Image (cartoon, rainbow, N blue to C red):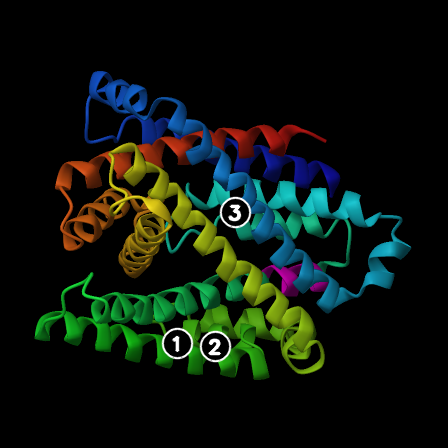
Amino acid sequence: MTWTKQRLNNLFFFLGCVAVVVMLFTFDVSFVELWQHITHAGYWLIPIVGIWVVVYALNALAWRAIILGNVGKDEIASRRLSSRKFFWRIYRLTITGYALNYATPVGGLGGEPYRIMELSKDIDKQHATSSVILYAMMHFFAHFWFWFISIFIYLALVLVGDMPITVAIGTILGTIVVFCLVAFWIFSRGYRNGLVVYVLNLIGKIPGLRGWSSRFQQRHAEALHNIDEQIAALYHQDTRAFYTSLVLEYSSRVVQSMEVMFMLLLFGIDCGGGLGGLTLTFLHSILIVAFTTLFANLIGFLPMQLGVQEGGFVLSIAALGLSAALGIFVSIICRVREIIWILIGMLLMKLK
């Protein structure tokens, strides 16, 4: 079993290395232009990359809250894992998991199998699986809340005369609101009744996969039932852990927006300066990240979302009346940051 896990670990490591190579050779600019963008960023690259230490810490705390709510503190303590040691282990798996997610298509689910494999070293496999699934659900659930609340941020800026509103813009905003409300309803069903068996039933409706879905459910019926029970139990029995995780995940999106704000400030865009100007710049950054992540997740089947993220940044920044050149700069520096953190994730994968 240990030998098999080591082989899987090496496979995940290989995927991450391939992702870095692919990303390096798929920039829309030459290496000379890329270096010019990096030198333009200068010392601002330090906070741009460094802010993700905080982002990943919030992600790790959100996942830790789910694990403790799902498994219990006593179970973790019984395995001789101190609170600090357990957090750093979750923090490492968070960074590595997201690094692997950049390498895979279908919404970036490559890190989840790795997290289950590694977390099952500390807790039983069923709880590890349900905890990873619960965190993945919470990650997407927080995305919808981020997009939903961003609509009202935009409307608030409209009221103060900072943002335009037209019939077309109103229609788009209304569509996003409906989209989020439908997602909230779907997630509420998943949290109340479990999600694994439901998803497998949906997969069974795909031509060619019906037999596989049926056989898989028959072989693992008890385990799947237990995992769904654990998913539902967190929502029904430990609402504190549930909402703590949600607030932390949402907060990570807000902190992530500071990355874009740093780049706007680099270009001298501060909405007049002062506290009010910086606040507006930060709110603009939230809107840019919200639109870009919405666009990228809608077309999340592309590996590393190549071209999608870049297009999202250009469109969202242009929608705020800023230059397309700024959008290209932001997208390129964000891609550089991703490569740096993928390399960090790959290094952490090999550290014991």
SS of the residue at dot 3? helix
Q: Earlier in the sequence, mark 3 or mark 1?
A: 3
Give the mark count. 3
| Quarter of the picture holding the C terminus | top right
| Side (left or right) of 273 relative to 78 | left
Give whichever of 265, 263 is nearer the camera: 265
Identity of the amino acid at label 2? Phe
- Residue at image mark 2: 187
SS of the residue at dot 2? helix
Q: Residue at x 62, y 51 (%)?
A: 60
- Residue at image mark 3: 55
Q: Quadrant of residue 158?
A: bottom left
Identity of the amino acid at label 3? Val
**Which label was assigned to residue 183?**
1
Tags 3 and 2 touching, CB below 8 Å: no
Q: Is residue 228 above or below residue 53?
A: below
Identity of the amino acid at label 1? Ala
**Magenta stretch, residue numbers:** 126-132
Q: Residue at x 48, y 48 (%)?
A: 110
